[in-house]
Image (tube, rainbow, N blue to C red):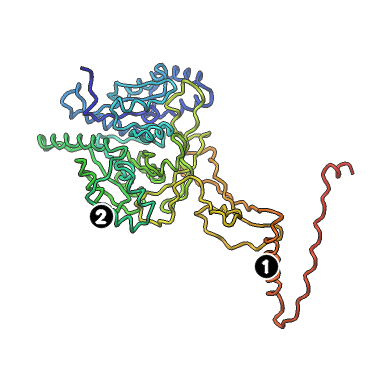
Amino acid sequence: MGYDLTGRLVVGVASSALFDLTDSDRVFRTEGEGAYRAFQERHLDEPLRPGVAFGFVRRLLALNDLAPSEEDPLVEVIVMSRNSPETGLRVMRSVRHHDLPITRAVFRQGHTPYEFIRPLHMDLFLSADEASVRDAVALGLPAGYVLDPTFADEPGDELRIAFDFDGVLADDSSEQEFRGGDLASYRRREDELSDVPLGGGPLRDLIVGIHRLQDVERARRREDPSYVPRIHVALVTARSAPAHERAVATLKSWGVSVDDAFFLGGIDKSGILEVLRPHIFFDDQRTQVESARLAAPSVHVPYGALNRAAGGEPGRPALAERSGGARDVAPKAQAPAPASTGSPSDAGAPAREPGRTSEDRDALDHATDDQAVDDRAAGGEPAVEEPADGQPGDTRPADVPPGPSPLPVPGVVRVSTVVPTPRSLEGATGTKELPLVTRVPELTVLGGTRDEGEAGESSRRSRREEARPSGGSPAEPLPAPKPLPVRQSTGLARHR
């Protein structure tokens, strides 16, 4: 009988998440595949630096000392890479250099490896290739996108993990109900369904597997009171009372308990995470991940209706959307991989270096935030008012408050404000950046209809009436407008 992965906690990690491949990726993008292969051969014996998921993976594998034997580990980690087997040699040598007990790997030259998540019974796949993660999650697979190439690892074997709830551990059905109503009705509904468990989200099996490891630790502590449990699991969610009861009931239905639970009701999570200092944090809201990434290695799980609406079709980066409960930030973008059959390091990890572009942010607040519920845009395009009576509609985005009505201008039907879609910022460093939004006045358009001309004349007549002196004597007639000068073409002027 072959080696059985069922019953173990199995994590797949892309080489771009396990190691810092910034230098390798730069060579591939600027000099091409041939130079990249030569670079890897020259540096074959030079170990890669730890990446953002390194600390999480190292601590997870260290728990195998609780296993009955080395041949029957509790945890399996498998490297998943788009490298060719030849260029992947440096990755596996780096694994050995850092004393990581990883013996299994999948190298697919230029192809995404996420199709093998299910046959390899993986509970989690981590990658710095956002397109691959989005495609995997769209297929119902447990995947997460790491936003940074590195995060400093600290010594020790304690493993602290923090999870958001809706859209990560549980499905997003409550979130969709919230977006379709208001906060009061959402709380009332969650209170009525407090004992009804929610369906599982993309990382349900991960927390169940981690809980199995905690059970092993508890058993060890009963045998050896000197043993100190190493796994610490925290729930950090925007839910608050009374909606918290349903989250607890859902975890209980899975046979899962957590060490800490923070029901924040819309409070920014980054302050909590700075104290908890988890070795990894999972959230489905991009703004939360952007805020948390400074405090902990953070993973975006692009799951649910709002992430699909914000990201368009699978594999496309999220569009900008205004959020009422968090700061608008511009996360780093995945640089497009060159068209090649031998791309390195899982389509390139996002790196803080010149040449990287910054994508528009996926600024969707958590569904259960205690915040203004007016801001519920679910798509990437700005809302447009419906035209009335066949006239051009106002193209002002829905989140821009209406300004004072402009004075009528002869020959101009309408004045509106257009907010162009922010372009990606060039040369992003990976820090929080605000996209440049330019408001451009738009005039529409000369030569109105007869009704519009009469309306304009009526408006001018009323203004003349208001301008009359209080004595009632007629005001001096307005002088006739001077004709516009006729500008000669540049060709005529040149001949003159």
Q: Position of residue 211 (x, y in %)?
A: 21, 37
Residue at numbered disc 2: 192
For label 1, count other residues whose C-alpha is less than 10 Å away and answer few (under 14), some (14-19) or many (20+).
Answer: some
Q: Which mark is residue 91?
A: none
Tell me if residue 294 can be seen.
no
Q: Which quadrant holds the C terminus?
A: top right
Task: Say what amino acid the circle numbered 1 marks.
Answer: Ser
Tell me if residue 139 can be seen.
yes
Mark 2 and mark 1: span between their CA atoms?
56 Å
Q: Position of residue 240 (x, y in %)?
A: 29, 54
Q: Position of residue 469 (x, y in %)?
A: 71, 79
Q: Nearer the viewer, residue 96 or 31?
A: 31
The residue positioned 19% from the left and 23% from the top of the image is 72
Is tag 2's residue or tag 1's residue first in the polypeptide sequence? 2
For this orientation, the residue located farthest to the bottom is 471
Q: Which mark is residue 459?
A: 1
For this orientation, the residue located farthest to the right is 496
Displayed quadrant of residue 185: bottom left
Q: Please tell me whether mark 2 sits on a helix, a strand or a loop.
A: helix
Displayed quadrant of residue 102: top left
The residue positioned 64% from the left and 52% from the top of the image is 442
Q: Which quadrant holds the N terminus?
A: top left
